[in-house]
Image (cartoon, grey):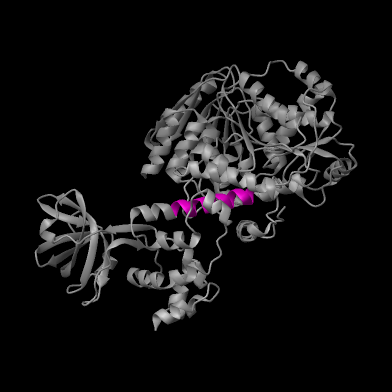
């Protein structure tokens, strides 16, 4: 009867139509993201237990993993003196018995009761004089129930759902559901890449007959995820479009005059990147390039040159920064740079009379260069002839803002910049529509930064070092702990820290945090730059864009609370002048990951090496917050492990869109719908080019 009902279930049916799933179980499935029967297809196993055979207990030995089948003879909570309680279970079969321990899992006592038939898979180790298992995977069986052997899927569970019920339900339903689902890949591509059908791959990833089947199924499904992501990113940004953009002149008289006015020559790294950008600007295809440059590598000069190339062509140039403070700072820097070529730079960060004037002058074309925040992409902002778009600190913006700013012009050239080093795997993933450039090396005069880790008990060492630097006429930053995502709480932490330091004579303490009005933040930063303060206590709003060459000391409280990228950015605020600089990380790491981050900071100043380490520690889904970029993340694919497949999918996506920019051909109908669903999931309402 169950088989008949399972075969009759359609992809779009509510989960309650499945035999054995009533309202209560349906609620448990909803907690796993399962609303309809078709959602079960991609409820992927977390892993597979390799239960090739059952081993009699008398044959198990330390150092290996075994599967045993028996009955529970004893089950009791134990609390050794001075240690945490644990559940001690004795499993017995006809050949002997084995002790099994579960730590921090007293709640299992009600499941693992004497007389219960149980199948357990785990590593056997020696504990003192005894041989035992700790925390095995287990499955409770009915007295007459035979265990499932082979590669057994382990599914995520919620509420009252049990492993055996999940396995039985999935095995019964998957064949009928899998054949109903359309294969998104056209047949020619499946043959070209030597892939199995998606239906076969789905069924064999859940219930493989062998490890070889499982890997073949995973290979197909990983490619599907990468191809879907690559197509979504390319189509979101219009990179599938083959229409011509604007040709700019990177060697115009205006650009040459600006270069001659600079009091320094470009570094070899800057020169190499400018050559790549110049080729893009000279091409009729709109530039779409990601510029990576470590802290202080000189990205702003490259941005200025790119903007001037557009201005030479009687176009407008826009520069978008992630915060008002950074927009103001970039406005000051670009205004100073462009003064040598008589170019006025406007600033647009919000509303008011001055903002209205900037909007009017931008719309009329009177104002040719403008710096702003996300206000630049608001509906009230229009450009006369936008030719160049610069997006600073790209990881702070979602894909929507980038696309909206680009749409203010007619296929403008776009340069997105970041000082957050991005591993190649993530650059290919999140910025799949962009060519990637990296400024190698630092400008002359940049000093190496000594990084020191000390415990909170020894923090006086760091603050004494700060006082010593202040006596020498140098300045320092002190970054308060990252208390919470709530900026108000972080601001309070900064205020408390500053007030405590002000009670100690001998230094002048400034304070800046995200809750202060913009004018006050700007005033304090200006005063610090003018040496009116010796020490600036701050939250992470100083993470990027702040340039005070006289600052040679950085102290970061509770450094384990910050990610590697943030720590690297904060450290980069010093070492920008002639003084040898030091960064103190005050930290008592409580986890292996936190300890690994602190150790990585001490060992290297290479931002890209740190980014790769961050990717290893935290995983690809978390490093840049992929959802805000229009990428919902991956369920099976891992850009680190599957880099070759990622690169192949990117090549296939570009080739496919070259011949069919909007996937309108009949053989691409399923694929277009699949990509459309991915975009809707990540960015509801986003226009698909």
> How many marks are shown on the rendered structure?
0
Residue 265, percent from left and from top: 68, 16
Image quadrant in which the N terminus is located: bottom left
Residue ID at (81%, 19%)? 257
Residue ID at (66%, 44%)? 516
Q: Is residue 198 above or below residue 292?
A: below
Residue ID at (15%, 64%)? 90
Is there any visible trace of residue 562 in the rendered image?
A: no
Q: Nearer the viewer, residue 198 or 438?
A: 198
Location of residue 293 (image quadrant)? top right
338 on left or right of 572 = right
**Magenta region:** 218-233
Q: Main secondary structure of the magenta part?
A: helix
Location of residue 361 (image quadrant)? top right
Q: Nearer the viewer, residue 54 or 248?
A: 54
Q: Is residue 374 magenta?
A: no
Residue 624, percent from left and from top: 55, 45
Residue 8, percent from left and from top: 48, 79
Q: Residue furthest bottom?
A: 1
Residue 637, percent from left and from top: 48, 50
24 on left or right of 257 = left
Location of residue 256 (image quadrant)? top right
Q: Nearer the viewer, residue 243 or 87?
A: 243
Is there any visible trace of residue 290 in the rendered image?
A: yes
Q: Is residue 231 magenta?
A: yes
Q: Is residue 247 above or below residue 100?
A: above
Residue ID at (44%, 53%)? 218
Q: Is residue 43 above or below residue 350?
A: below
């Amino acid at each position: 009867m169950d088989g008949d009902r399972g075969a009759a279930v359609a992809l779009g049916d509510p989960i309650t139509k499945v035999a054995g799933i009533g309202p209560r179980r349906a609620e448990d499935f909803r907690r796993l993201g399962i609303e309809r029967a078709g959602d079960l297809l991609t409820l992927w196993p977390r892993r597979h237990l390799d239960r090739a055979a059952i081993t009699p207990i008398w044959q198990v030995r330390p150092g290996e993993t075994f599967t045993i089948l028996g009955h529970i003879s004893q089950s009791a909570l134990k609390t050794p003196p001075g240690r945490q309680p644990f559940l001690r279970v004795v499993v017995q079969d006809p050949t002997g018995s084995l002790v099994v321990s579960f730590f921090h899992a007293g709640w299992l006592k009600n499941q693992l009761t004497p007389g219960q038939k149980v199948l357990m898979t785990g590593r056997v180790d020696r504990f003192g004089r005894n041989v035992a298992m700790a925390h095995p995977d287990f499955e409770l069986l009915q007295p007459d129930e035979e265990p499932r052997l082979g590669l057994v899927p382990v599914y995520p569970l919620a509420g009252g759902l049990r492993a055996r019920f999940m396995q039985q339900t999935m095995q019964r339903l998957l064949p009928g559901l899998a054949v109903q689902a359309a294969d998104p890949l056209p047949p020619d591509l499946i043959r070209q890449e030597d892939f199995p059908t998606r239906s076969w791959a789905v069924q064999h990833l859940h219930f493989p007959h062998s490890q070889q089947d499982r890997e073949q199924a995973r290979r197909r499904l990983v490619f599907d995820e990468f191809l879907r992501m690559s197509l979504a990113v390319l189509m979101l940004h219009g990179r599938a479009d083959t229409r011509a953009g604007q040709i700019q002149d990177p060697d115009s008289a205006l650009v040459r005059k600006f270069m001659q006015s600079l009091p320094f020559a470009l570094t070899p790294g800057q020169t190499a990147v400018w050559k790549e950008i110049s080729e893009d600007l000279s091409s009729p295809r709109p530039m779409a390039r990601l510029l990576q440059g470590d802290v202080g590598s000189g990205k702003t000069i490259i941005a200025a040159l790119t903007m001037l190339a557009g201005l030479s062509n009687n176009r407008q140039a826009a520069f978008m920064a992630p915060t008002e403070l950074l927009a103001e700072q970039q406005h000051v820097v670009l205004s100073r740079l462009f003064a040598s070529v008589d170019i006025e730079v406007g600033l647009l960060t919000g509303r008011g009379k001055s903002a209205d004037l900037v909007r009017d002058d931008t719309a009329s074309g009177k104002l040719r260069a403008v710096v702003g925040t996300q206000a630049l992409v608001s509906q009230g902002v229009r450009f006369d002839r936008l030719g160049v778009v610069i997006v600073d600190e790209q990881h702070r913006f979602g894909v929507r803002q980038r696309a909206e700013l680009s749409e203010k012009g007619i296929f403008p050239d776009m340069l997105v910049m970041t000082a957050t080093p991005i591993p190649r795997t993530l650059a290919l993933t999140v910025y799949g529509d962009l060519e990637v450039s990296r400024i190698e090396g630092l400008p002359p005069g940049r000093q190496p930064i000594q990084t020191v880790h000390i415990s909170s008990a020894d923090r006086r060492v760091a603050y004494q070092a700060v006082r010593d630097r202040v006596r020498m006429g140098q300045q320092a930053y002190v970054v308060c702990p990252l208390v919470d995502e709530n900026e108000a709480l972080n601001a309070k932490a900064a205020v408390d820290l500053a007030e405590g330091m002000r009670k100690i004579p001998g230094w002048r303490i400034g304070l800046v945090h995200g809750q202060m009005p913009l004018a006050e933040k700007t005033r304090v930063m200006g005063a610090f730059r003018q040496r009116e303060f010796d020490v600036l206590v701050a939250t992470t709003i100083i993470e990027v864009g702040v340039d005070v060459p006289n600052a040679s000391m950085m102290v970061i409280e509770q450094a384990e609370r910050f990610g590697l990228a943030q720590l690297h950015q904060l450290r980069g605020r010093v070492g920008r002048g002639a003084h040898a600089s030091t960064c103190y990380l005050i930290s008592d790491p409580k986890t292996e990951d936190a300890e690994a981050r602190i150790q990585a900071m001490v060992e290297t100043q290479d931002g890209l090496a740190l980014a790769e380490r961050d990717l290893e520690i935290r995983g690809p889904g978390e490093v840049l917050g992929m959802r805000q970029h229009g990428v919902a993340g991956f369920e099976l694919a891992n850009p680190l492990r599957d880099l070759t497949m990622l690169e192949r999918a990117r090549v296939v996506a570009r080739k496919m869109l070259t011949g069919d920019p909007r996937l309108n051909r009949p053989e691409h109908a399923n694929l277009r719908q699949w990509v459309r669903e991915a975009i809707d999931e990540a960015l509801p309402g986003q226009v698909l080019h």
